[in-house]
Image (cartoon, rainbow, N blue to C red):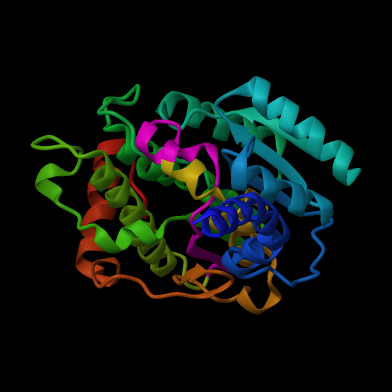
Amino acid sequence: MLGYLESVLLLLLLLPLLVFVLLPYIRKYFGGGVCKSAAQLNGKVVVITGANTGIGKETARDLAGRGAKVILACRDMAKAEKAAHEIQIKTGNQEVIAKKLDLADTKSIREFASNFLKEEKELHILINNAGVMMCPYSKTADGFEMHFGVNHLGHFLLTFLLIERLKQSAPARIINVSSLAHHVARIHFQNLQGEKFYFRGLAYSHSKLANILFSQELARHLQGTGVTVNALHPGTVLSELVRHSFTLKVLWNMFAIFLKTPWQGAQTSIYCAVTEELETVSGKYFSDCKPANVSSQGRDDETAKKLWNVSCELLGIQWN
């Protein structure tokens, strides 16, 4: 019996050491694809929403390192300015700029776009990266349900306001960060914003499905313009996105070694933004730096068109 207990104790003592030794290999295994493109972006202008932390910050750092002028469009200016300064130091690129953008307020979105159009004559890459996840039921400044309002409508309006600058700068790219969670979602137009019932997880999934439907319908609208739009799943990333859910935060910390780091999670965003082979590819969905499957609901053209029209009505815009 003593020998058995000694063996168990020895195993318990060695387990942390074993995990430490294997950690790089575990990280690499679950890390997914890596963008291998060496493309440079000198003279290019990039806007990334939610780029003060997580995969947005890592995406910004990479593109700045390739020579692009990168605008961090963020709600929290203190964090955004700190992130911009850190990226400037790491890359040596001084053209990394923090700008105020609150996707939960259409007034803020319009102010950001107006200022951008006055200051910048070109826009080559727009990465709609920011998002909220698992929020308690709440509304944006304009009365939209938070997930739908920020993750979908906010980026829908921002893209609408910047689309002509993207066309003028073609070839240009729009990248929408969606999620694998779209597979469990359906668009219920009678409960689009939780009017009848509300579940955090479903609200998030619906907004991510909306990102894909928006990407596909926008790709049809942009045919022949030289502007492409694609959506992606970054992977399950150890980030601040789960801050609204205590349960998810606990699970994320418990299984942290099996989750992607922000750098790993940013790879597909970077891949979609810079890879030469994707210059004319539009309306597709990627994961781990390669094409991925979209749910049947995400391929429904009629749903995409209806969501497009409803979104325009809610925002009071007319997109020809």
> Is residue 42 left or right of 75 when viewed as pictured?
right
Whether 71 is drawn above or below 292: the answer is above
Q: Quadrant of residue 73?
A: top right
In the image, residue 252 lies in the stretch drawn in magenta: no
Count of marks overlaid on the render: 0
What residue is drawn where x is 66% and y is 55%?
A: 14
In the image, residue 240 lies in the stretch drawn in magenta: yes
What residue is drawn where x is 65% and y is 79%?
A: 277
Task: Give the farthest residue toward the bottom.
Answer: 277
> Is residue 252 left or right of 133 when viewed as pictured?
right
Q: Position of residue 291 (x, y in %)?
A: 50, 76
Q: Position of residue 48 (x, y in %)?
A: 61, 44
Q: Position of residue 123 (x, y in %)?
A: 66, 50
| Boundaries of the magenta span | 225-250
User: Is 137 or 239 nearer to us in this picture?
Assistant: 239
Whether 104 is drawn above or below 4: the answer is above
The answer to whether residue 289 is visible is: yes
What residue is drawn where x is 52% and y is 59%?
A: 4
Whether 251 is drawn above or below 226: the answer is above
Q: Position of residue 33 (x, y in %)?
A: 62, 70
> Is residue 25 left or right of 157 when viewed as pictured?
right
> Is residue 84 left or right of 108 when viewed as pictured?
right
Task: Give the farthest residue toward the right.
Answer: 92
Q: Where does the C terminus fall, quadrant-wise?
A: bottom left
The answer to whether residue 122 is visible is: no
